[in-house]
Image (cartoon, coloured by chain):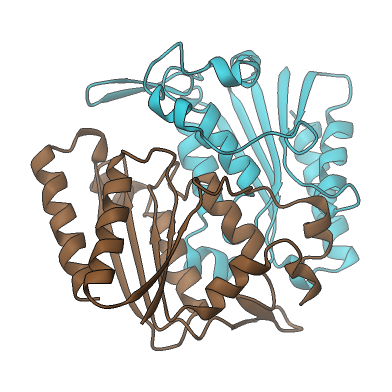
Amino acid sequence: MRVHVVFAHPLHDSFNAVLHETIVEGLRKAGHTVDDLVLNAEKFQPVLTAEERSAYHDVGGNLVGVESYVERLRAAEALVISAPTWWYGMPAILKGYFDRVWLPGVAFGLQPRGAITPLLTNIRKYAVVTTTGSPWWFMRLYMRDPGKIVLTRGVRRLFAPDVRMTYLCHYGTDDSTMQQRQRFVARVKSTFEEF
Amino acid sequence: MRVLVIFAHPVETSFAAALHKTVLEALGNRHEVRDVDLYAENFDPRLTREERLMYHDVGVNEAPVAKYVEALRWAEAVVFCFPVWCFGVPAILKGFFDRVLMPGVAFDIDGALVTPKLQNIRRVVAVTTYGRDLWRVKIGVGDLPKKQITRYFRWFCAKDAKVTYLAHYHMNISTPESRATYMRRVTGVIAAL
């Protein structure tokens, strides 16, 4: 399978970088073709510009400047997002990747009454690997895990209707132990070796 | 009151820009106003390697964004003005959260104990627009931007801080009337600050 991995974290020696490496290694071991996009290494510019915003609804014309990212997304049969959860959502660099690349005519079509048709039906498998600083009970019970809902319900709807999804989250990273982190890495490893 | 306005939209002729203008006009000269237009300032929303490394180093961590930290400590009220794109705030505003609202500025961490630090802020208003309808935003995708402002940002502020979240949903099929009605609501709330 052709798997597009999108990774965001500014440190190449962070826990998230370890998770990213584990994902890519696991996928290769499983025989998949990996197209790895490391947003920070590319110095991806996440700010949707005035020109881009003005052309946003111009399907086709809105691709200027992001063609290569769109091509990679369209060529994918599976997508893996690897990034920490900051402020209950994705880091700005990843948010900007969605703002600028997941456009009308690319990720979704807009119907006259405002309904949305999914356009990334080439994606049949989808996984998210993330970490949160806060403990799970705070994230789930108080905040209702809004970052998770965006990725699992909002983004997922744009893929094939029978897409298979995996969401792996290491909660409470602010004070998790080495042992807990190693257990999570092992879980990520086995998930992607069998992806 | 000392009011800090934080605005995020790149297009001058947009509805968001019109809302921003309405906010400033409604504030008038009854308040001390500081207007931060993130696009006009070319704010870079990417938390850098250096910033991430010193993120928990209270005092030192605020140096790269000192200007914004100072504005937040100065403010008694904050007005966020932005559109919702792809289920969230624009990347440029998300980066403002990531880079500016950090330990020592928004909160202090002492072991498991986290205490809010922006208790000078007593009033928070958000002025925003969504492409989709309320039902889909709330039930469908959990309304992340609303939670970030009404539950999370609010938590850093004074204990009795009042938050008003003003949103025009379903912009994709909005009408001149629906936008005018919303504009009046925004004017009303801001003028009453």
In the image, A46 versus A114, the foreground residue is A46
Q: For this view, does A152 lie left or right of residue B19?
A: left
Question: Is residue B133 shown to the viewer in this render?
Answer: no
Quadrant of the rendered structure where residue A104 is?
bottom right
- Spot occupied by residue A10 in the image (x, y as percentages of width and height): 44, 39
Relative to A194, is A10 above or below? Answer: above
- The shade of chain B is cyan
- Spot occupied by residue B78 in the image (x, y as percentages of width and height): 66, 29
For the point 31% across and 39% down, the residue is: A14
Q: Which chain is brown?
A: A
For the point 60% across and 38% down, the residue is: B45
In the image, A128 versus B172, the foreground residue is A128
Q: How many marks?
A: 0
Q: For this view, does B160 lie left or right of residue A183?
A: right
Q: For this view, does B78 lie left or right of residue B136?
A: right
- For the N terminus of chain B, give its image quadrant: top right
- Spot occupied by residue B83 in the image (x, y as percentages of width and height): 70, 52
Relative to A13, is B166 above or below? Answer: below
For the point 19% across and 76% down, the residue is: A194
In the image, B44 versus B30, the foreground residue is B44
In the image, B18 versus B139, the foreground residue is B18
Question: Is residue A183 shown to the viewer in this render?
Answer: yes
